[in-house]
């Protein structure tokens, strides 16, 4: 055989050229964006309609889509078809979500649960929880726990029924250990939900739950989680019980003060299972697999298996599954740089998730998940490429995750709470390197507890090294100057936050240039440039916060406030920015003046003095101090006003007017109506006890106030010092009160026994307000009144316990907070 001679290639004397990371392609594939927007719009509309109307709307969209499809076929190849084809996907997505919502509505409202909730009836129910009980902030009363459940069966008014209606349960400590897979039998009251949502009712238990524990995988997983949390807490590692929250989303053992510090520094998402947690699991496993030289498909498969194991360990609730989907999409964009593929996946995930649960459209958790994922997809690869100019590629990609997610979520976060965590980005950057380690160590520790418990101890110790570091970051950040500063509320604040986030991104892009070739640079120059751009961006954001800071120290979002004026009454209803309706003024001008100043009230649209006892009008001078009072009304059995009150009104140019049943008015969006005293009682003349009620207390004005909210209105009944007999006559004269009930009731006469509790039972309020002085000589509120409120599952907000407090319409109902918070 003959072989052709081949000339060998000369050995190269040069080192192979290093190719730096390439600037990622801009993800511009927005073709599915109209379909995602149509799905979101359809979900928002369909969930607010009855099932029949939603089904009709879905059928209409289906017919429109079919007609449009036929037109596209008929005009195939023509210009008209090119205009019609892009409309097919949005119509299909809207139809899918609308029909899904109609089916869910029909299933949820079948049975008497919805009707019983509207009647606020007592029922016996069999519940199947769809989530574990979670603690909710208890600013008043005993600790409460909330869980979501399905009413499978029950009885109401002596009739048995079956149903599949989702409800929210608010229970006491006896509900603490109830969770997914259990079967619960309980007696309680159903109430309409406080805002539109998936749940058709709120269930308030009136008796201890009878629980049949879960069996199988649900029970086994719960025991593992409990054992893991107990072992972590028993170690006393100084992390404030943070490890269970970071590893498996269990916040039950988290120290309250550390929880507040995490919130202040923008690290709260690390204590719950979010898309970020899932992103870290995927990132860690994917990068580890690639480091082991596994091909990309194998590394991606390993990452997905790890994510599935993580979801199983933390319990596959809808929020966890949503977080896993969003986290997987976002981290795929950062780790691969393939933004063109990730963006369509994000839009597709939005459509699928809204079809599975149309009520996600109004969930802030879902909005935050979508925003964080969009941030990872759109700006994550760009930031990673810039950071790679000064850091190793793997470190740049990991650091890009929290920065991109935080910047994208900030506008929504300030909508939830009008304040800004100035150090959120630096805190997330400081925490980011250890979070994947903590998550993986926690997962392995749970597995070790299941297989060989002694092996869990070193894993717990390793995990708590990382969680202890995160706790330290949170504590240090909370103690730093301007850790959390007030921000402009509402849409203007969100727009401003979005602008500042964009400026930070532009600052990073302008300050750091991506490497185009392997040009040697000194390490301190490389790291210094990256640090400089981040510090400059954060400083820009902090400067914007400080320079544009609104009135500091004033609460926002409140609708009603109870002023701590000692032994007396003074309540405030928010009617607009700086404006309020004030009901009574307490005995001390200084106390009510301080309360109104703390609430930033400068204009009093209406001052109502319910009756002429000193503890209700003696502080009126404090209401007028430095404020414009536009109207004064009062009720009394006395023929004239006291001299001091008359002088105040005359100096303000007001003509005081008596108030009686039938009087109505409006201030801002707040409407009020006087229900007592009856106008037939001539209280304008006669002796000092010239009423047919026998006392000045029974001459008290009773006002029904209607307050608008973002999703529903709230009703408040202010009762002055009306006593039991008069309150019964009030109920007899207004039977509609018993039918509709009220959301908030001001307990009459500071909770004295002569005020009675029959009105509480008749009106079924969700919250009671009591104004009384701490340690007062009258024994207010009376222990029997407090016991009756507790027995009827009515939580009482008391000025003697909380001081001045505010009430707001929150996501899960009424929220009470001491003004000092």
Image: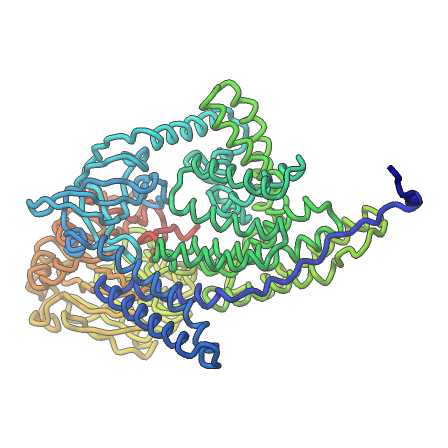
**On screen, residue 671 above or below 97:** below
Q: Is residue 153 visible?
A: yes
Left or right: where 807 falls relative to 158: right
Name the spot of residue 448 as percent of width and height, x first: 49, 24
292 and 613: which one is in front? 292
Name the spot of residue 347 as percent of width and height, x first: 48, 60
- Occupied quadrant, residue 15: top right
Name the spot of residue 3 as percent of width and height, x first: 88, 40
**On screen, residue 306 above or below 821:** above
- Occupied quadrant, residue 601: bottom left
694 and 57: which one is in front? 57
Q: Residue at x 6, y 44 (%)?
A: 158
596 and 87: which one is in front? 87
Residue furthest bottom as drawn: 79
Scheme of image coloration: rainbow
Count all numbered tags in the image, as a single digit.
0
Q: Is residue 783 visible?
A: no
Q: Residue at x 44, y 50 (%)?
A: 821
**On screen, residue 244 above or below 628:** above
498 and 162: which one is in front? 162
Left or right: where 762 falls relative to 472: left
């Amino acid at each position: 055989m003959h072989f052709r001679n081949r000339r060998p290639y000369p050995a190269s004397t040069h080192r192979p050229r290093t190719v730096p990371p390439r600037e990622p392609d801009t993800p511009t594939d927005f073709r599915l964006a109209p379909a995602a927007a149509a799905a979101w719009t359809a979900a928002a509309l369909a969930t607010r309609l009855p099932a029949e109307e939603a089904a009709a709307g879905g059928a209409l969209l289906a017919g429109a889509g079919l007609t449009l499809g036929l037109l596209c076929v008929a005009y195939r190849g023509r210009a008209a078809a090119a205009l019609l084809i892009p409309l097919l996907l949005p119509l299909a997505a809207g139809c899918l979500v609308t029909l899904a919502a109609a089916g869910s509505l029909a299933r949820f409202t079948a049975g008497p649960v919805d009707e019983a909730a509207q009647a606020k009836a007592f029922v016996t129910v069999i519940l199947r929880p769809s989530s574990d009980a979670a603690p909710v902030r208890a600013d008043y009363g005993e600790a409460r726990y909330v869980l979501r459940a399905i009413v499978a069966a029950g009885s109401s008014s002596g009739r048995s029924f079956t149903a599949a209606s989702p409800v929210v349960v608010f229970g006491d400590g006896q509900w603490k250990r109830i969770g997914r897979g259990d079967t619960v039998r309980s007696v309680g009251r159903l109430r309409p939900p406080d805002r539109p949502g998936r749940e058709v009712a709120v269930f308030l238990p009136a008796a201890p739950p009878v629980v049949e524990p879960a069996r199988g995988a649900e029970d086994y997983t719960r025991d593992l989680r409990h054992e893991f949390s107990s072992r972590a807490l028993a170690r006393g590692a100084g992390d404030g019980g943070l490890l269970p929250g970071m590893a498996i989303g269990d916040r039950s053992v988290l120290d309250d003060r550390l929880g507040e510090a995490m919130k202040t520094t923008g690290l709260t998402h690390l204590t719950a299972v979010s898309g970020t947690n899932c992103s870290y699991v995927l990132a860690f496993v994917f990068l580890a697999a690639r480091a082991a030289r596994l091909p990309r498909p194998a590394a991606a498969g390993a990452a997905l298996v790890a994510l599935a194991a993580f979801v199983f360990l933390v319990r596959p609730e809808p929020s966890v599954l949503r977080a896993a989907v969003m986290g997987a999409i976002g981290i795929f964009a950062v780790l691969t740089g393939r933004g063109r593929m990730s963006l369509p996946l994000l839009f597709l995930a939005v459509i699928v998730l809204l079809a599975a649960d149309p009520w996600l459209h109004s969930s802030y958790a879902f909005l935050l998940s979508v925003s964080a994922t969009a941030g990872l997809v759109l700006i994550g690869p760009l930031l990673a490429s810039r950071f790679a100019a000064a850091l190793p590629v793997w470190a740049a990609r990991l650091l890009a995750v929290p920065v991109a997610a935080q910047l994208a979520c900030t506008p929504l976060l300030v909508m939830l709470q009008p304040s800004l965590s100035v150090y959120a980005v630096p805190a997330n950057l400081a925490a980011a390197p250890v979070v994947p380690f903590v998550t993986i160590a926690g997962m392995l520790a749970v597995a070790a507890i299941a297989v060989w418990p002694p092996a869990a101890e070193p894993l717990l110790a390793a995990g708590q090294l990382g969680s202890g570091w995160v706790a330290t970051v949170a504590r240090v950040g909370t103690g730093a100057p301007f850790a959390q500063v007030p921000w402009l509320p509402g849409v203007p604040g969100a727009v401003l936050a979005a602008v500042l986030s964009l400026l930070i991104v532009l600052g990073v892009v302008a300050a750091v240039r991506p490497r185009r070739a392997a040009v040697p640079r000194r390490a301190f120059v490389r790291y210094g440039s990256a640090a400089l751009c981040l510090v400059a961006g954060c400083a820009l954001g902090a400067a914007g916060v400080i320079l544009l800071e609104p009135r500091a120290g004033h609460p926002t979002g409140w609708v009603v406030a109870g002023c701590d004026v000692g032994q007396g009454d003074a309540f405030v209803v928010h009617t607009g920015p700086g404006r309020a309706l004030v009901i009574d003024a307490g005995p001390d001008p200084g106390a009510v003046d301080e309360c109104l100043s703390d609430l930033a009230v400068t204009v009093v649209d209406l001052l109502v003095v319910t009756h002429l006892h000193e503890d209700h009008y003696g502080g009126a001078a404090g209401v007028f101090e430095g404020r414009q009072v536009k109207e004064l009304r009062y009720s009394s059995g006395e023929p004239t006003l006291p001299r001091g009150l008359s002088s105040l009104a005359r100096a303000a140019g007001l003509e005081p007017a008596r108030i009686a049943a039938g009087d109505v008015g409006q201030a801002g969006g707040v409407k009020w109506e006087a229900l007592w005293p009856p106008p037939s009682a001539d209280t304008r003349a006669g002796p000092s006890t010239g009423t047919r009620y026998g006392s000045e207390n029974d001459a008290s004005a009773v006002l029904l106030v209607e307050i608008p909210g973002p999703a529903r209105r709230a009703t408040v009944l202010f009762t002055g010092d009306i006593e039991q007999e008069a309150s019964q006559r009030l109920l007899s004269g207004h039977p509609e009160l018993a039918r509709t009930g009220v959301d908030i009731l001001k307990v009459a006469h500071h909770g004295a026994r002569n005020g009675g509790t029959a009105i509480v039972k008749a009106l079924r309020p969700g919250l009671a307000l009591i104004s009384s002085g701490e340690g007062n000589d009258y024994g207010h509120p009376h222990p029997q009144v407090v016991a009756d409120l507790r027995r009827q599952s009515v939580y009482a907000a008391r000025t003697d316990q909380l001081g001045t407090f505010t009430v707001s319409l929150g996501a899960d109902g009424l929220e009470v907070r001491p003004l000092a918070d």
